[in-house]
Amino acid sequence: AGPWHALIERDGGLGAFAQGLYGCSEMSVNGLLALAEAGVVRRPADEQGVLVHGGFFLGPQAFYQRLREMTLEQRARFSMTRISFINELYGQEDLKRRQRRDARFVNTVFGMTLLGAGVADQLEDGRVLSGVGGQYNFVAQGHALEGGRSVLLLRSWRESGGEVSSNIVWDYGHTTIPRHLRDIVVTEYGVADLRGKTDAQVIEALLGISDSRFQDELIEQAQQAGKLPADFRLDQRFTHNLPERLQRLREQHAGLFAEYPLGSDFSAVEQDLVRALSWLKSKLRLTEALELGKATLDAPEPGAYPEHLRRMNLEAPDGVREILYQRLLLAGLQATAAP
């Protein structure tokens, strides 16, 4: 658990679930069903034995098939109900407060400011990526319920057009979750507990789970705004937050990081293609051009991956462009092939 051991012990714990959990989600997904079948979600919310309240169900085909195979009694434990019941406390509030005791509300955002505001539905230029849905409602419930916590999940950096940038920024022109509702934030690098903290403490906590390639710039911006002292230094434990370190950890513990731990609608060939295309996308930058060119020259013959080429309609390339696409795909497949 590292630097976050105390937080995990206080607000979560690593022990077994004695009573089990109750699930409540606007979107009921495959993960909730897997948790129920594993015995983690097993605390009935009412006399009817409902384990999960969901507004709608979304997942791979195996998820729907499993629901269809259940007996009526089993299926009744997964109740599809109105969104207002799930997303709001008002209306049967006393009952909901008892059902949702010590709740942990988990949502995702694509961006966050250093002061703790979350961004999930719209870009700052006005382009809308999704509806807010119940995200704001659940974050607010995390503060309104006794013992409740809101948890926002965030990838610390992104890549676009061959350029990398931080998803944790000093300022952003749109907000989905306001800074006064800041609570727990989780990135691939760790956990930040922001509730009840000063701005300076919030900034330091978020720097600790940001990508180290952007930390110096973020610190400078916070100092210019007068939110951090001029002599501020980030704890050395958090200055090695780099993708390469995570990749080494993943390779050392490969058995713990299945690509699709709950299954997937992708065939084995399609899963190979996802890896190959992701690899190619990561190489579309000037600094990677030499490596990509060499990989393309060293790509295997088409006969090594006939099904993969057929799936991409590149088994018989027509013209120079498609020949190049075929070579690039073969290079990606070779680079990401299982050892």
Image (spheres, grey):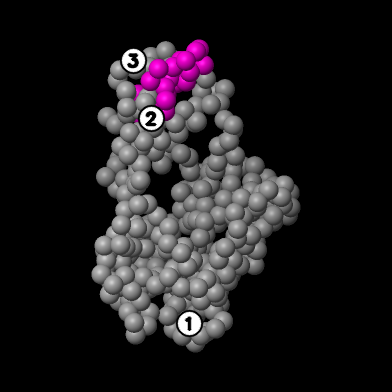
Helix, strand or loop for disc 1: helix
Q: Which residue position holds label 1? A: 97
Left of 215 or right of it: where is 66?
left
Q: CA distance from mark 3 to mark 2?
A: 16 Å
Helix, strand or loop for disc 2: helix
Discs 1, 3 touching: Cβ within 8 Å:
no
Left of 224 or right of it: where is 108?
left
- Is residue 165 or residue 58 the one in the foreground? 58
Q: In the displayed structure, would residue 100 be above or below residue 211? A: below
The image position of residue 180, as x and y in percent, is: 64, 67
| Majority SS type along the magenta span | helix
Asked if the stretch drawn in magenta spans residue 181, the answer is: no
- The span picked out in magenta is 311-336
Q: In the displayed structure, would residue 325 be above or below residue 149? A: above
For marks 2 and 1 on the same chain, the one whose residue lies earlier in the sequence: 1
For marks 3 and 2 on the same chain, the one whose residue lies earlier in the sequence: 3
Q: Which residue position holds label 3? A: 301
Q: Which residue position holds label 2? A: 311
Q: Quadrant of the C terminus?
A: top left
